[in-house]
């Protein structure tokens, strides 16, 4: 594996290797001295052409915990505003000497373009491209599900090789604009979980039936089926033409039909967890009762993101040093 571009590219062995390595990284993060020397001397560039809080900061924290140097590039305030292309931006950074690129871009396929040309010759990690893919989000979600839905089911570490066979996951919300949904369906299927996608017909992409997940328009049916996890997706109003853009009658109506409120939450099985990749629209796809509930894994997902990104950077950038023990 030279790059991490797409959840679909990950075989079961690849996915388990990243998840198990992330468990080792999480163990080191619990120590007083969190740093590992495995990427000392390497430089990682965070190339963000689109806004981010969690992904950008956790990739930076992950690289620093592995002792890499980090260059943070944000399109805002850069020469991109003067018309500089992705190719010229990438080659400019490459000329300064880099060992890996983390890229978020509003254009679907931009990370693949970077990885498949000779513009640069270093590992590329996709931090979210358009409505296409967000593989590290799917990995951190799977890591969280392993910890809460298998073993002691309390968020603690699980044995190496743990998959998600038999787990049922409902993903509800703006599937149309969601790179998180696509990556999650692909990875969860590889790990043996079954997925139900729930959305109004207007927020489902053409061809969703071919994704390998069940599709429903009825959240109450999906809740009453007793899933192990419900993942809410953000209504991506910035990708819609107006407040609701004609995708749904009103925010109030959306919340009434597709929002996770207290009543729906209380009908879930006792062990079921509530997930959201963030940022959340409280009162739209998720109520504060649900977002702040004890069974909400929103903040553990963020913490687990650092471990997953440490694992991905280590496996792709450490090279021959990856044979070294992590402890
Ligand atoms: N989940 C996620 O990608 O969040 P950010 O946009 O804040 O990185």
Image: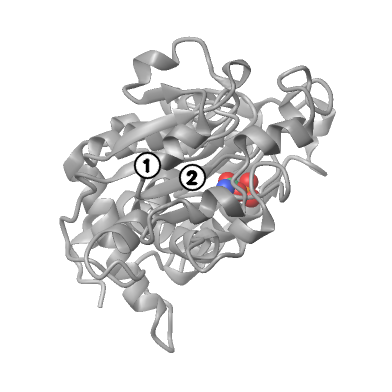
33 shown above or below 206: below
Residue 48 falls in image quadrant: top right
**Percent x, y of residue 296:** 51, 61
Residue 239 falls in image quadrant: top right
Label 1: which secondary element: strand
Residue at the far bottom: name it.
32
What numbered label is drawn on residue 231?
2
Relative to residue 74, is residue 113 drawn left or right?
left
Residue sitting at x 41%, y 76%: 29
Residue that badge 1 annotates? 169
Pick the front one: 23 or 192: 192
Query: Are the residues at dot 1 and dot 2 in contact (C-beta closer than 8 Å)?
Result: yes
CB of mark 1 near ligand 1 (< 8 Å): no
**Percent x, y of residue 210:** 35, 14
Q: Find the distance from the CA under tag 1 to the CA under tag 2.
A: 7 Å
What is the quadrant of the N terminus in the image? top left
Q: How many marks?
A: 2
Residue 8 falls in image quadrant: top left
């Amino acid at each position: 594996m030279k790059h991490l571009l797409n959840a679909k590219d990950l075989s079961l062995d690849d996915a388990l290797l990243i998840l198990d390595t992330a468990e080792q990284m999480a163990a080191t993060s619990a120590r007083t001295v969190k740093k590992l020397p495995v990427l000392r001397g390497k430089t990682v560039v965070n190339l963000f052409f689109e806004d981010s809080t969690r992904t950008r900061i956790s990739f930076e924290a992950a690289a620093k915990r592995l002792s890499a140097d980090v260059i943070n590039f944000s399109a805002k305030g850069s020469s991109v505003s003067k018309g500089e292309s992705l190719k010229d931006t990438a080659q400019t950074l490459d000329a300064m000497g880099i060992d890996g690129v983390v890229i978020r871009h509003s254009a679907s396929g931009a990370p693949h373009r970077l990885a498949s040309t000779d513009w640069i010759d270093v590992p590329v990690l996709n931090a979210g491209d358009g409505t296409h893919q967000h593989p590290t989000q799917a990995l951190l979600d799977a890591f969280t599900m392993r910890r809460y839905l298998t073993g002691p089911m309390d968020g603690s570490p699980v044995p190496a090789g743990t998959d998600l066979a038999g787990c049922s996951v409902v993903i509800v919300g703006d599937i149309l604009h969601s790179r998180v949904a696509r990556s999650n369906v692909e990875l969860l299927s590889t790990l043996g979980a079954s997925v139900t996608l729930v959305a109004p017909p207007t927020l489902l992409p053409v061809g969703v039936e071919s994704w390998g997940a069940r599709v429903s328009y009825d959240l109450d049916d999906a809740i009453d089926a007793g899933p192990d996890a419900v993942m809410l997706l953000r209504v991506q109003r910035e990708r819609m033409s107006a407040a609701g853009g004609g995708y749904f009658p009103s925010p109030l109506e959306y919340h009434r039909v597709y929002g996770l409120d207290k009543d729906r939450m209380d009908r879930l099985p006792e062990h079921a967890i509530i997930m959201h990749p963030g940022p959340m629209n409280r009162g739209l796809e998720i109520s504060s009762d649900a977002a702040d509930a004890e069974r909400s894994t929103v903040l553990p997902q963020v913490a687990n993101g650092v471990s997953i990104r440490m694992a991905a950077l280590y496996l792709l950038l450490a090279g021959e040093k990856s044979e070294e023990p992590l402890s």
